Image (tube, rainbow, N blue to C red):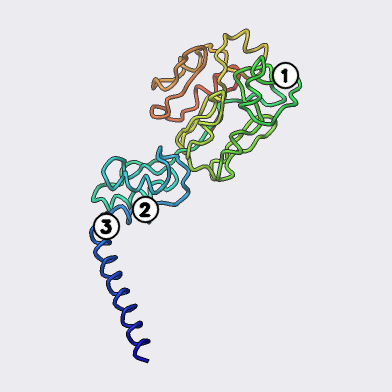
């Protein structure tokens, strides 16, 4: 019996020593925890989409707590999350206007011609590698193979009649579709923006008209109509500065190709 008691005492003593050593190690090697970082992380939506430019919500929370990122850096959370994080950091939430993706192409199957039959992998980056950049007559337009669709975590973009179309109500402006499009057709514009140019063809007018019924011909009529300097023509393509656009609609009304559309 005495041997059992001695063995139990030895085991207990060893356990006590180990516990003390672990406690000391925990104190010595403890990693400082930023309470603000934890609080900020709790307010972030947790999509880990990378739209903020960081690897995920954990990385963004750390950057915000360290003052390296703005409190409104999360495109998914929007103004509501920005205000909550601003309160944690002791600053104003700032301007966090809702942004959405917009596909700058109106060349649906009815508006542009198919110059070849593509039988490869249904991926825009693969299709654009073939001679002529895809199967459509317009080499600048939407390829329609859905790489942007596959990249979207929010079911906000789908290919309709050969062209990707964004659902404004579902889009959170994470920017993944922007990065995925090989023809650089997608840009982020304000949710409440009134008009946008639905084309990206940089060729001159005659070449554009030969491949698409609705392509921008770079005539400049839209720019002449705008009283606020919001519309410019560069590289034969019109572009609207959303920060200057008042939504008067004169550019859309006078556009001969009707390629400036209500957003």
- Kindly state the secondary structure of the residue where label 1 is placed: loop
Residue denoted by label 1: 113
Residue denoted by label 2: 41
Q: Which mark is residue 197?
A: none
Q: Nearer the viewer, residue 204 or 61?
A: 61
Image coordinates of residue 99 in percent, x first then y, are 45, 38
Image coordinates of residue 68 in percent, x first then y, are 28, 40
- Kindly state the secondary structure of the residue where label 3 is placed: loop
Task: From this view, report whether residue 32 is shown above or below residue 96.
Answer: below
In the rendered image, which quarter is residue 144 located in?
A: top right
Between the residue at mark 1 and the residue at mark 2, the CA separation in whole angstroms equals 49 Å
Tell me whether circle 3 and circle 1 mark residues in contact (CB < 8 Å).
no
Point out the tag, 3 or 1, that comes first from the N-terminus: 3
Point out the tag, 2 or 3, that comes first from the N-terminus: 3
**Quadrant placement of the N terminus:** bottom left
In the rendered image, which quarter is residue 246 located in?
A: top left
Q: Residue at x 64, y 18 (%)?
A: 133
Between the residue at mark 2 and the residue at mark 3, the CA separation in whole angstroms equals 20 Å
Residue denoted by label 3: 30
Q: Nearer the viewer, residue 51 or 165?
A: 51
Q: Nearer the viewer, residue 3 or 193?
A: 3
* Closer to the eye: label 1 or 2: 2
Point out the tag, 1 or 2, that comes first from the N-terminus: 2
Image coordinates of residue 208 in percent, x first then y, are 62, 12
Between the residue at mark 3 and the residue at mark 1, the CA separation in whole angstroms equals 65 Å
């Amino acid at each position: 019996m005495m041997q059992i008691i001695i063995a139990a005492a030895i085991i207990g003593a060893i356990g006590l020593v180990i516990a003390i050593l672990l406690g000391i190690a925990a104190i010595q090697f403890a990693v400082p925890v930023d309470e603000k970082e934890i609080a900020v992380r709790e307010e972030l939506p947790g999509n880990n989409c990378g739209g903020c430019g960081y690897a995920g919500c954990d990385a963004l929370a750390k950057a915000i707590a360290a003052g390296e990122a703005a409190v409104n850096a999360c495109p998914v959370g929007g103004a509501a999350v920005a205000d909550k994080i601003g309160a944690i950091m002791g600053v104003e939430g700032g301007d966090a206007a809702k942004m959405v993706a917009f596909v700058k192409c109106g060349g649906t199957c009815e508006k542009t011609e198919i110059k070849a039959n593509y039988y490869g992998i249904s991926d825009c980056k693969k299709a654009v590698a073939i001679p002529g950049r895809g199967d459509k007559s317009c080499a600048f337009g939407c390829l329609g193979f859905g790489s942007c669709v596959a990249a979207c975590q929010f079911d906000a973009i789908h290919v309709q009649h050969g062209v990707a179309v964004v659902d404004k109500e579902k889009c959170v402006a994470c920017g993944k579709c922007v990065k995925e499009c090989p023809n650089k057709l997608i840009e982020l514009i304000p949710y409440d923006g009134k008009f946008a140019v639905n084309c990206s063809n940089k060729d001159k007018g005659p070449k554009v008209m030969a491949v698409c019924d609705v392509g921008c011909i770079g005539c400049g009529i839209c720019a002449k109509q705008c009283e606020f300097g919001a519309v410019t023509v560069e590289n034969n393509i019109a572009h609207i500065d959303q920060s200057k656009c008042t939504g008067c609609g004169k550019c859309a009304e006078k556009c001969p190709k009707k390629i400036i559309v209500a957003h």
